[in-house]
Protein backbone atom coordinates (compact mmCIF):
# COMPACT_ATOMS: atom_id res chain seq x y z
CA UNK A 1 0.00 0.00 0.00
CA UNK A 2 1.37 3.40 -0.94
CA UNK A 3 1.24 6.22 1.55
CA UNK A 4 -0.10 9.67 0.76
CA UNK A 5 2.22 12.42 1.83
CA UNK A 6 3.26 15.56 0.02
CA UNK A 7 6.90 15.13 1.02
CA UNK A 8 7.47 11.98 -1.03
CA UNK A 9 8.61 9.78 1.88
CA UNK A 10 7.65 6.10 1.75
CA UNK A 11 7.72 3.76 4.74
CA UNK A 12 7.00 0.02 4.95
CA UNK A 13 4.00 -1.00 6.97
CA UNK A 14 2.27 -4.14 8.12
CA UNK A 15 -1.47 -4.09 8.67
CA UNK A 16 -3.30 -6.60 10.85
CA UNK A 17 -7.10 -6.77 10.57
CA UNK A 18 -7.72 -3.95 8.12
CA UNK A 19 -10.67 -2.22 9.77
CA UNK A 20 -14.12 -1.66 8.41
CA UNK A 21 -14.90 2.04 8.83
CA UNK A 22 -18.52 2.20 7.72
CA UNK A 23 -21.07 3.87 10.00
CA UNK A 24 -18.39 6.16 11.39
CA UNK A 25 -18.29 9.88 12.10
CA UNK A 26 -15.63 12.17 10.67
CA UNK A 27 -14.82 15.42 12.47
CA UNK A 28 -12.47 18.18 11.35
CA UNK A 29 -11.44 20.60 14.06
CA UNK A 30 -8.61 22.76 15.29
CA UNK A 31 -5.80 20.91 17.01
CA UNK A 32 -5.33 21.52 20.73
CA UNK A 33 -2.39 20.90 23.09
CA UNK A 34 -3.94 17.65 24.32
CA UNK A 35 -3.64 16.25 20.77
CA UNK A 36 0.12 16.79 20.45
CA UNK A 37 1.31 13.31 21.43
CA UNK A 38 -1.14 11.60 19.05
CA UNK A 39 -0.29 13.96 16.21
CA UNK A 40 3.46 13.47 16.69
CA UNK A 41 2.88 9.73 16.32
CA UNK A 42 0.81 10.35 13.19
CA UNK A 43 3.58 12.61 11.88
CA UNK A 44 6.09 9.76 12.26
CA UNK A 45 3.84 7.43 10.30
CA UNK A 46 3.14 9.90 7.49
CA UNK A 47 6.34 11.92 7.24
CA UNK A 48 9.00 10.05 9.19
CA UNK A 49 9.07 12.59 12.01
CA UNK A 50 8.93 15.92 10.21
CA UNK A 51 7.83 17.95 13.25
CA UNK A 52 8.34 17.13 16.92
CA UNK A 53 6.15 18.08 19.88
CA UNK A 54 7.82 21.47 20.24
CA UNK A 55 7.20 22.21 16.56
CA UNK A 56 3.49 21.49 16.88
CA UNK A 57 3.32 23.57 20.06
CA UNK A 58 4.83 26.54 18.18
CA UNK A 59 2.21 26.19 15.46
CA UNK A 60 -0.57 26.11 18.05
CA UNK A 61 0.73 29.35 19.55
CA UNK A 62 1.15 31.15 16.23
CA UNK A 63 -1.72 33.39 15.12
CA UNK A 64 -0.57 32.88 11.54
CA UNK A 65 -1.03 29.10 11.56
CA UNK A 66 -4.15 27.07 10.97
CA UNK A 67 -3.43 23.59 12.37
CA UNK A 68 -6.27 21.13 11.89
CA UNK A 69 -6.89 17.47 12.68
CA UNK A 70 -9.27 14.89 11.28
CA UNK A 71 -10.83 12.42 13.72
CA UNK A 72 -12.76 9.24 13.09
CA UNK A 73 -15.11 7.72 15.65
CA UNK A 74 -17.28 4.63 15.47
CA UNK A 75 -21.01 5.13 15.98
CA UNK A 76 -22.05 1.51 16.53
CA UNK A 77 -19.82 -1.36 17.60
CA UNK A 78 -17.47 -0.89 20.53
CA UNK A 79 -14.52 -2.86 19.19
CA UNK A 80 -10.80 -2.48 18.63
CA UNK A 81 -8.45 -3.50 15.84
CA UNK A 82 -4.71 -3.57 16.17
CA UNK A 83 -2.70 -2.01 13.38
CA UNK A 84 1.08 -2.32 13.47
CA UNK A 85 3.17 0.16 11.51
CA UNK A 86 6.88 -0.40 11.11
CA UNK A 87 8.23 3.14 11.08
CA UNK A 88 11.14 4.24 13.24
CA UNK A 89 10.73 1.00 15.24
CA UNK A 90 7.40 2.12 16.65
CA UNK A 91 3.98 0.51 16.71
CA UNK A 92 0.64 2.26 16.53
CA UNK A 93 -2.72 0.92 17.66
CA UNK A 94 -5.93 2.50 16.42
CA UNK A 95 -9.20 2.05 18.25
CA UNK A 96 -12.77 2.54 17.18
CA UNK A 97 -13.49 4.97 20.01
CA UNK A 98 -11.94 8.09 18.49
CA UNK A 99 -8.64 8.39 16.64
CA UNK A 100 -6.77 11.21 14.92
CA UNK A 101 -6.16 10.00 11.38
CA UNK A 102 -5.31 13.25 9.60
CA UNK A 103 -3.41 16.46 10.14
CA UNK A 104 -2.84 19.56 8.05
CA UNK A 105 -1.45 23.05 8.47
CA UNK A 106 -1.12 26.31 6.60
CA UNK A 107 0.89 29.43 7.30
CA UNK A 108 -0.63 32.81 6.46
CA UNK A 109 2.26 34.91 5.12
CA UNK A 110 1.25 38.30 3.75
CA UNK A 111 -1.36 37.45 1.08
CA UNK A 112 -0.28 33.80 0.75
CA UNK A 113 -1.40 30.54 2.32
CA UNK A 114 1.59 28.21 2.50
CA UNK A 115 0.39 24.63 2.99
CA UNK A 116 3.12 23.07 5.09
CA UNK A 117 1.77 19.59 5.90
CA UNK A 118 -1.14 17.43 4.85
CA UNK A 119 -1.13 13.79 5.85
CA UNK A 120 -3.56 10.93 6.33
CA UNK A 121 -2.84 7.82 8.39
CA UNK A 122 -1.61 5.14 5.93
CA UNK A 123 -4.49 2.87 6.85
CA UNK A 124 -7.08 5.45 5.78
CA UNK A 125 -5.63 6.74 2.53
CA UNK A 126 -7.42 6.76 -0.83
CA UNK A 127 -10.79 7.15 0.89
CA UNK A 128 -11.28 10.88 0.23
CA UNK A 129 -9.99 12.18 3.56
CA UNK A 130 -7.06 14.02 1.97
CA UNK A 131 -9.52 15.89 -0.25
CA UNK A 132 -11.57 16.77 2.82
CA UNK A 133 -8.57 18.30 4.60
CA UNK A 134 -7.36 20.17 1.52
CA UNK A 135 -10.81 21.64 0.97
CA UNK A 136 -10.91 22.79 4.61
CA UNK A 137 -7.48 24.42 4.32
CA UNK A 138 -8.45 26.26 1.15
CA UNK A 139 -11.63 27.49 2.78
CA UNK A 140 -9.61 28.62 5.80
CA UNK A 141 -7.29 30.57 3.48
CA UNK A 142 -10.33 32.21 1.87
CA UNK A 143 -11.79 33.08 5.27
CA UNK A 144 -8.49 34.79 6.13
CA UNK A 145 -8.77 36.90 2.99
CA UNK A 146 -5.63 35.42 1.44
CA UNK A 147 -5.11 35.70 -2.29
CA UNK A 148 -2.96 32.69 -3.16
CA UNK A 149 -2.07 29.22 -1.88
CA UNK A 150 1.25 27.46 -2.44
CA UNK A 151 3.11 24.31 -1.43
CA UNK A 152 6.00 22.03 -2.39
CA UNK A 153 5.53 18.40 -3.35
CA UNK A 154 7.96 15.69 -4.44
CA UNK A 155 8.10 15.41 -8.22
CA UNK A 156 7.53 11.64 -8.01
CA UNK A 157 4.58 11.80 -5.61
CA UNK A 158 1.92 11.10 -8.22
CA UNK A 159 -0.96 10.59 -5.75
CA UNK A 160 -0.31 13.93 -4.03
CA UNK A 161 0.08 15.75 -7.36
CA UNK A 162 -3.19 14.26 -8.56
CA UNK A 163 -4.94 15.63 -5.48
CA UNK A 164 -3.55 19.12 -5.84
CA UNK A 165 -4.18 19.28 -9.60
CA UNK A 166 -7.78 18.26 -8.93
CA UNK A 167 -8.09 21.35 -6.73
CA UNK A 168 -6.72 23.65 -9.40
CA UNK A 169 -3.08 23.92 -8.34
CA UNK A 170 -0.55 24.50 -11.13
CA UNK A 171 3.21 23.97 -11.46
CA UNK A 172 5.16 27.22 -11.31
CA UNK A 173 8.69 26.02 -10.58
CA UNK A 174 11.02 23.36 -9.28
CA UNK A 175 13.42 23.25 -6.31
CA UNK A 176 16.38 21.09 -7.26
CA UNK A 177 17.47 18.56 -4.61
CA UNK A 178 14.89 19.90 -2.17
CA UNK A 179 14.59 16.65 -0.21
CA UNK A 180 17.86 16.07 1.58
CA UNK A 181 17.34 12.37 2.30
CA UNK A 182 16.71 11.43 -1.33
CA UNK A 183 18.05 14.37 -3.31
CA UNK A 184 14.72 14.52 -5.14
CA UNK A 185 13.34 17.70 -6.64
CA UNK A 186 10.22 19.41 -5.36
CA UNK A 187 7.61 20.96 -7.60
CA UNK A 188 6.27 24.34 -6.52
CA UNK A 189 2.50 24.51 -6.88
CA UNK A 190 0.29 27.59 -6.77
CA UNK A 191 -3.41 28.35 -6.71
CA UNK A 192 -4.30 31.98 -7.34
CA UNK A 193 -7.41 34.17 -7.24
CA UNK A 194 -8.70 33.00 -3.85
CA UNK A 195 -9.90 36.54 -3.20
CA UNK A 196 -12.09 36.76 -6.30
CA UNK A 197 -15.85 36.47 -5.96
CA UNK A 198 -16.01 33.35 -8.11
CA UNK A 199 -13.90 31.41 -5.64
CA UNK A 200 -16.78 31.22 -3.16
CA UNK A 201 -18.74 29.24 -5.73
CA UNK A 202 -15.69 27.03 -6.27
CA UNK A 203 -15.62 26.29 -2.55
CA UNK A 204 -19.28 25.31 -2.60
CA UNK A 205 -18.65 22.91 -5.46
CA UNK A 206 -15.63 21.41 -3.68
CA UNK A 207 -17.74 20.97 -0.56
CA UNK A 208 -20.34 19.01 -2.51
CA UNK A 209 -17.68 16.83 -4.13
CA UNK A 210 -15.61 15.99 -1.07
CA UNK A 211 -18.59 15.23 1.16
CA UNK A 212 -20.16 13.18 -1.60
CA UNK A 213 -16.90 11.24 -1.97
CA UNK A 214 -17.23 9.95 1.60
CA UNK A 215 -21.00 9.59 1.75
CA UNK A 216 -20.80 6.54 4.02
CA UNK A 217 -19.75 8.85 6.86
CA UNK A 218 -21.30 11.58 8.93
CA UNK A 219 -19.09 14.63 8.41
CA UNK A 220 -18.88 17.65 10.68
CA UNK A 221 -16.64 20.65 11.23
CA UNK A 222 -16.31 21.81 14.83
CA UNK A 223 -15.36 25.40 15.57
CA UNK A 224 -14.69 26.16 11.89
CA UNK A 225 -16.49 28.43 9.44
CA UNK A 226 -17.70 25.75 7.08
CA UNK A 227 -21.16 25.08 5.67
CA UNK A 228 -23.69 23.63 8.10
CA UNK A 229 -23.01 20.08 9.19
CA UNK A 230 -24.10 17.43 6.73
CA UNK A 231 -24.97 13.78 7.22
CA UNK A 232 -24.83 11.28 4.37
CA UNK A 233 -25.67 7.62 4.65
Image (spheres, helix red, strand yellow):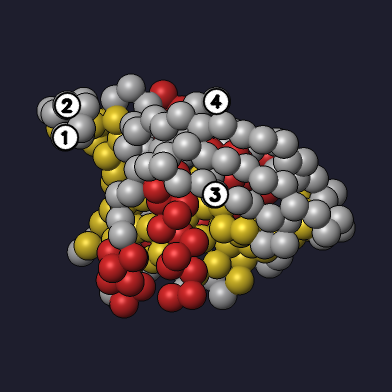
Residue at image position (73%, 41%) is: 19
Residue at image position (24%, 36%) is: 188
Q: Nearer the viewer, mark 3 or mark 2?
A: 3
Determine the secondary structure under disc 1. Answer: loop
On the rendered image, what quadrant is the N terminus found in?
Answer: top right
Q: Quadrant of residue 40?
A: bottom left
Residue at image position (47%, 52%) is: 42
Upstream in the sequence, badge 2 or badge 4? 4
Q: Kindly identify which residue carries mark 1.
A: 180
Judge the density around disc 2: few (<14), some (14-19), many (≥20) Cα neighbours within 10 Å: few
Judge the density around disc 1: few (<14), some (14-19), many (≥20) Cα neighbours within 10 Å: few
Residue 92 numbered tag: 3
Q: CA distance from mark 3 to mark 1?
A: 27 Å
Determine the secondary structure under disc 2. Answer: loop
Q: CA distance from mark 1 to mark 2?
A: 5 Å
User: Is mark 1 in CB contact (under 8 Å) with mark 2?
Assistant: yes
Rendering coords of residue 29 (x, y %): 55, 67
Residue at image position (46%, 29%) is: 12
Judge the density around disc 4: few (<14), some (14-19), many (≥20) Cα neighbours within 10 Å: few
Determine the secondary structure under disc 3. Answer: loop
User: Is mark 3 in CB contact (under 8 Å) with mark 1?
Assistant: no
Looking at the picture, tell me which residue is in the foreground, 35 or 138: 35
Q: How many numbered marks have been drawn onto this rendered protein structure?
A: 4
Q: Kindly identify which residue carries mark 2.
A: 183
Q: CA distance from mark 2 to mark 4?
A: 23 Å
Residue 1 numbered tag: 4
In this view, which residue lies farthest toward the left? 176
Q: CA distance from mark 4 to mark 3?
A: 17 Å
Upstream in the sequence, badge 4 or badge 3? 4
Amino acid sequence: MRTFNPFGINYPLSIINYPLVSMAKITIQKMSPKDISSVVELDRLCFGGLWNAQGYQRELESPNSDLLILLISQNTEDRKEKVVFQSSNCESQLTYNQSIIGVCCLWAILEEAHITILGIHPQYQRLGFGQLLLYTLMRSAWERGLERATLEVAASNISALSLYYKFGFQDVGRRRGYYQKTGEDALILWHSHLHQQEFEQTLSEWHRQVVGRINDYEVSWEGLKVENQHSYS
